[in-house]
Image (spheres, helix red, strand yellow):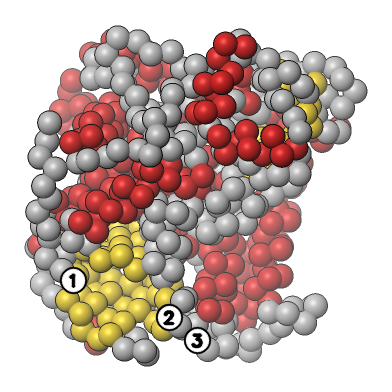
Amino acid sequence: MPDRRLPRAPQPQVLADSDDALVLRTDVLVIGGGPAATWSAISATEAGARTVLADKGYCGTSGVAATAGTGHWLVPPDVVRRDEEIGAREVQGGYLTDRTWSDAILDEAWFRTELIDGWGYRPARATPRPPTFALRPGDRTFAGQSPDYLRFLRGRTKRGGARILDHSPALELLVDDDGRVRGARGYQRQLGRPWTVLAGAVVLATGGVTWKSHSLGSDVDTGDGHLMAAEVGAHFSSMEFSNFYGMVPLGTSMDKNGFFVRASYWDHEGVPIHYRNLHESRAELLAASLRGTITAQFTQFPPETRARVRESMPNFFMVTDKLGVDPFTQRFPMDWVQEGTVRGTGGIHLRDRDAWTGVPGLYAAGDVTARDKLVGAATGAGGPNLAWAVATGTWAGHAAAGAAARTDDVALTALRGSGERGLRPSSAGRRTTSASGGEAWRDVVAAVQDHMLPIDHAAFRDDAKLAASRSALDALWEQDALLVPAAGWAGLEAIRTREAAAMLATARWVVRAARERTETRGMHTRTDHPATDPAQAHRLLVGGLAEPWVSVDPEAPVTGALATLPAQKEAS
């Protein structure tokens, strides 16, 4: 068992710490606070790098992972098992995955989570593996609930020597004259002061974007990292697969469960609804919901398994208990919540298995990145996303530490802020208020939600709808003065205007990519192109702010049994 003793990395240097400002110098800055961010910080400190982690909320409790399970996708390092598991995801994901990446992700997740016990991880209480998943020889489980897991990762991050800035959203990246990312600026909400961190390298682990749909824990996921990455030249992949809808008991936001995939459904007239793989597409159920409220019942759990199911995800059953519903024996009305890129697939395109974004000094991990190489056009909900977070977080932290070691310190005066939209006007114009008299960023958010949240618009697409969305969202982007905070980039209002700008930017990329993919594949449903086109078995890249662009990813999906791919694995 590995030694629990943990060597501490050197502390970041404090350049200023007053009521007016905090300025730090470090080797690695990690922006985010969930599993990908903490694994990044842990990996960086393991490499001996001075590390700062800045979270929008309180690291260990904020974001979607805090209310979810801990079911990592863990597959033993056995070629036959890997081929079986990866092959199933390949089919489900519309043949857009990459087996060499999938194998590497599973290797890293298996190894890193194996270290947890040796590090002293002891959940408050053991959580049984849900009977939905059968254990096989060589398998292992991951114990505990998310609060246990995230609390432990926070503690491990701090014990390794990293400094954590809670309630400290980042607002922009800092770059030098060569375009290299060298830190970030943000605002500490509870202390009411700006912060600046000078760094040798930066890791973005800010999560996905749900456009404030009120998916449980996701209202902090507003695309901040996507916007910051685009401003320094990064681009994105598979943004068309960013319309995954979570299932919730009607009137709630409780979308954190995996039990709906083993349920039976009836439409508003009581007619059974037949469906396919709900991880791949939920089109049949979504279409029925447009005709009226549908009902669900967890019919595929034998009575002897139900106690274990309840214990494996108590927060979901707390909600059904309050509603007075036994979901195993009673039908209950259900609804949908847009989960965007969190359970969708799109995000920052990673160039290699250092989790590099293609921008000097900038790395990324977790849900802010595209998971298409792992799950393709289908959702990575739960296990695959957690495995991706562990692996890319580890890679990004280690690579960022290495990059920082090769980089000299730089003075703050030699850097410039890269943020514009939502921080500074990029053209002449005056700040405006909304039609209701409030701040105009609220109108921007509402307008974006009109295009990104409704099922009949975001789940069922056609060229006319997408063209209308493109025109409306582009027109909003051109109204620069709508998103200029009164006090410049610092202050609470700048956080809101910046969030609105990020939600608008991500929505524009989604619409561009969705219009380009003239077929139905995975969660992307085109009612005017209902068939899957074999000629479009490629990933789409998208980027740009003023003029978004779309192109085919020159790196083709990698399919076939792992045993037949030694050359590709060696080369990558």
Q: Which mark is residue 359?
A: none
Q: Tell whether 465 sits left or right of 548.
A: right
Crowding near pointer 3: few (<14 within 10 Å), some, many (20+)?
A: few
Task: Give the CA distance from mark 1 to mark 3.
Answer: 28 Å
Helix, strand or loop at label 3? It is loop
Q: Residues within 10 Å of mark 1 (few under 14, many from 20)?
A: many
Q: Residue furthest front?
A: 125
Q: Nearer the viewer, mark 1 or mark 3?
A: 1
Return the x and y of residue 105 as percentages of the image width and height: 29, 33
Locate residue 117, reporting x and y percent.
23, 34
Residue at 43% x, 13% y is 134
- Residue at label 2? 191
Q: Which residue is mark 3?
A: 488
Seen in the image, is 236 located left or right of residue 80? right
Circle nearer the viewer, 1 or 2: 2
Name the side, left or right, on which 38 lies relative to 540: left
Quadrant containing the N terminus in the rendered view: top left
* Residue drawn at point x = 59 percent, y = 62 percent: 504
Residue at mark 1? 12
Residue 260 image position (x, y, % from top left): 63, 26
